[in-house]
Every structure is written in C-alpha cells, then in structure tokens.
Amino acid sequence: MSTVLQTYGLTKAFGSKLAVDHVDMTIEQGDIYGFIGKNGAGKTTLMRLVLSLALPTSGSYELFGAAPTAQSRRRIGSLVETPGFYKNCSAQENLTRFAGLYGTDLSEVKDVLGLIGLEGTGSKKAGKFSLGMKQRLGIGIALLNHPDFIVLDEPVNGLDPAGILEMRNLIQSLNRERGITFLISSHLLDELSKIATRFGIINNGKLVEEIRSEDLRNRDGNRTRFVVNDPQAAREALLPAAGAENITVRDHALLVQGQTGDVPRLNRLLVEAGIEVSSISHENSSLESFFMERIGR
Amino acid sequence: MGKLLCFELRKLFRQVSFYVCLAVLGAVVFLGIFSTYSMIRLMKADIGLEIDMEMLESFGLGLHLNGRGYLLSALNGNNLTLLLGIFFALFICSDYVNGTAKNVIGRGFSRMKSTAAKQIVTAAGTLVFCLAACGLAFVLASAYWGVGKDWELLDLYRFLIQLLVILAYAAFFSFFAFLFKKSGAAIAFNIIAPSLLSLILTLIDIFTEKKKIYFSEYWLADCLTVSTDLSAKAAELTRSGIIAGVYLVVFVLLTHLVTARRDV
C-alpha cells in the first residue's frame, strides 16, 4: 500500500508556542484518517501545513511518496476551517470558476453539483445558503478535478443530523468507489468512529498516537459482557479458559476482556457449569474513552 | 499562469463592484463636463456674456475645452485614484475574506504566481478604468466643443506617462490590500493614505529650511498633476514617468515580499 502523506518532524511555531511539534504522521492510500484533538491542539495548523497554506518552521513532508510539487498538490482537495467560495456567486458559478482554474472539464461541474445536492439552487447566491449548503459547496470545490486525497477540517460542523448522515455516506462512497484517501478532523468522535479506518490523536501539537480502527476495537478495552445469575460461580467456571486477569465481576455481570472471538465457547462453559446466562453483549472501547485516556484526562 | 490569469480576469469582469465603480467614474466624468457646459451656456444665454478664449483661460479652462483637452486631463484629480483604491481593496481582499485564496494555494499554485496574476489583472482593470474615463471625457467634450486642434506626438507620450502614474497608484493600493487582507482596513487606508502622504510631504517641505529637494515633487500626486498639465514639457513628463516607474517597481516587489512566505 502506498503512502499518501508522510510527515517528518513537522513543526510550526507561532512565536514561542509550538502549534505543531515534531509530528511524524503517516496516511496510507485508501485510509479515512480521523484526526482528533482538543481545540487548539494543532489539527487545523497541521492540515494547513500539508496544504501549504502555512509554511513549516521545521520538518518536512512527502505527498504520494515524494517531495511535494505543484503537480502533487493538484491531486489534493481540501476544506479547511470555513469553506472558501464567492458569496455573491451561485453554486454553479463558484464551481465553474474553480473548475477553470483546476483545468477540470466544465461538464464535471454538473456532476459535482448533483453529487453534493446543490443542483436545484439555480442563481441563488452562495452567501445566502444555509450552513450545510455552504459546507457542501466547499466539499464540491474540493471534489473538482478528481482529487486522490481530500483534507476536511470539521466537515460536519453546523450540519443537522440528516446532513451529517449524507456527509458520512458521501465520504464513504467516495472512499469506496473512487479510492479517495481522506484526512478528516472532527470533534464528533462518535461520528468519526463510524467512518475512520485509522486515527491520529494530537495533543498540544504532538501526535500522541496513531492507531488503526480494528486495533482500537481489539485493544484491551474490548470485552464481552455476560449477565448471569451467579457472577462469582461464573467467574470460577471461566477462570481456566480466560485467565483471572481478564475477568471482572461487576454487579450481575461478568466482563471478559480480549475474548471477543471466543464467545460461543465461553457461553458453553457457563451453561455446562449450570449458570444461567440472560444476555451476552460486546462492549467496544469507545473512541472517546481512548482519546481521553491518551490526552491524559 | 494562464489558468490563474483567466481565473482572475473572470473574477474581475464578474465582480459587481467593478461595474459600480466604473458607473460612478462615468457619472463623475459626465457631471464634470456637463456642469462646465451648462455653466458656459447659462452665462451666454442668461447674462448675455460673450465667452471668448481669453476668458476661458482666466477660468483655467482654455486648453481643456475640447475633446483633446479633456482626453489628456481626464485622469487628473482624486476621483479616479479614490475609486481605484476602493475597488482594488475589494477585489484583492475578496479572496482572503471569502477564503478562496486557500482553494488556489492549496491546489499547488504558488504564492508568487497567484500574486503576479492578481497584479497583472489589477493593471488590466486599471487600464479599463483609465480608458473608460478618458474615452467618455473625449466623446462628451468633443460633442460639446469639438475634437480640438493642435494634436501632437507629445500627447501620446503624455497619455502613456499618465497611464504609468495611474498604474503606480494601482500598485500602491494593491500592496496595502495584500498587506491588510481585510477589505475594510484596506479601503480606509487607500482612501486616506494618498492625501495623507501628500500632506506630510508638503509639511516636510515647509519645515525643511535648506531646500535642495522638494519631497512632494517625488510623490505620485505631483507626477499626476504634471502629466495631466497640457503645458508640461517632455522633460517634465519623463521625470514624472521615471518617478512613477520607480514606485511601480517598488510596490510590485514589496507586494511579493509580503506575500511570499505569509500564511494564507
């Protein structure tokens, strides 16, 4: 799998404050990279560095496996901070202007308008659009000229639940059908956890951890919850199979860590020991708890 | 670069403020000429005063009162520079205010090329303003008083120097628009700065005891006054042209210096 973005000690200082502090980030082709961090952690600054909107104090980065060039930047679409468009122009005029600039066939404008659901806006000025429509127009501009990599900073900001769902579906379909790689920052961790294939956590400018979503699901925090009539007896029954360190008794439930693939066998052991199992559920470690843990809260 | 130029040109010619400023300029030119025409007509008709060239000279109108005169003096005064200051602040800052500069730089267009494209289109816009003002003044004045006689090659030189001075003004306004990035601040500065600078330089001249140099003569306002003076000689025009050229180059380079490594 080829690398779309690789940063090497990327650093950006504003005065004495390091907004981005020696970040080594890797984004592989096909990733939906969820970039999470508190306000002011450095997410937007890092995105701006990658897009050359800001220049690094030190460090470097590669795009598509090589030093960035004008050509490699043409392969990146972006929506950073607020969507950039001309408020006094219609959605179509905005897309037409940027299509001309990016060398995109003008016929693509109509396709993009349809894709972002703004085909019926006619001559309505973009400045009078709702927040969600503005956001979609920003995404539309980012989609022009078939980018291979899209950088989205808080793309669901201001969207209603239906808009969030549409955005999620759009990102997933673009990733699946066109193979577009995404770098997405969002405060809505639950939302991000539904689409991201990889996460990066940034805190005080430092990249604290990068983790694949399946690794996050399989890490220690993943556990199976058995609700039983006699938790102590259940614990005794499972000790040989699961190990004492992996079993926790809580109220009427038995929490077994790291055994997600072995649930049928554990259930059979409980039944054979005469224990009534009233429910079995899988508990994922939430992205939120993982994030809070990693930023030291 | 070609795509950037097309992008900026499309923006220029689709910007409502461009046509508003052109219309205002046209109205100012028209009102100026029409008021002169009306004043003379009223003096003739109502008072019965016979207007001859000598009298017009005493009003400072003698050389101007025909198509040629208005063509060559249409760029004089603060109206055009004021409108240019306002329009270029709006035009250049719009990309920063709307956030569209991110869509340009983020897609691999260099800061230098993006700035250069804006500067070239700014120059093109300036020429449109100048030609519109001069063209309208020439047509109206010719209709009222005739095209004018005594055309000479120096007129073309005079006109080109005027364009150079106005282009230097445009570079000056553009620089501050790039510097401030906010249209409000840039408009305010562009309105105040030229006259403030003139005032400061005049004060310096007044309070400088040993006058070998008059600083106010080295400011664009003086260059514009000289180049629109129909009695100015070629040497004076050349001097104004050189000063304007220096300002043009300095402000173009300063703009690139400001934008080269700045965050968008």
Image (cartoon, coloured by chain):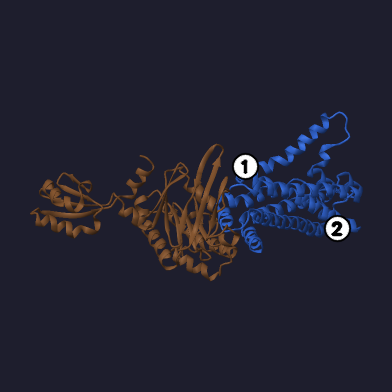
Q: Across the whole image, how many numbered discs are drawn on residues? A: 2
Residue A85 placed where, x, y %?
Answer: 53, 56
Q: Which residue is mark 2?
A: B156
The chain holding disc 2 is: B
Is B227 on the left or on the right of A269, as rendered?
Answer: right
Badge nearest the viewer, 2 or 1: 1
Residue at horizontal 53%, vertical 48%? A10
The chain holding disc 1 is: B
Q: Which residue is mark 1?
A: B185
Instruction: Specify which label sits upstream in the sequence, 2 or 1.
Output: 2
Determine which of the numbered discs, if any, sits on residue A37 in the image: none
Instruction: Quadrant for the C terminus of chain A, please.
Output: top left
Q: Is residue A40 above or below residue A153?
A: above
Residue B190 placed where, x, y %?
Answer: 68, 44
Chain that is coloured blue in the picture = B
* Amino acid under disc 1: Ala
Check disc 2 and report its element: helix, strand or loop: helix
* Amino acid under disc 2: Leu
Residue situated furthest left in the rendering? A274
Residue at horizontal 55%, vertical 48%? A59
Q: Is residue A137 visible?
A: no
Q: Is residue A207 above or below residue B22?
A: above
Residue at horizontal 75%, vertical 38%? B197
In which quadrant of the rendered view does residue B204 lie?
Answer: top right
How far apart, in angstroms, are the residues tagged by discs 2 and 1?
37 Å
Check disc 1 and report its element: helix, strand or loop: helix
Front-most of A223 and B262? A223
Front-most of A107 and A253? A253
Chain that is coloured brown in the picture = A
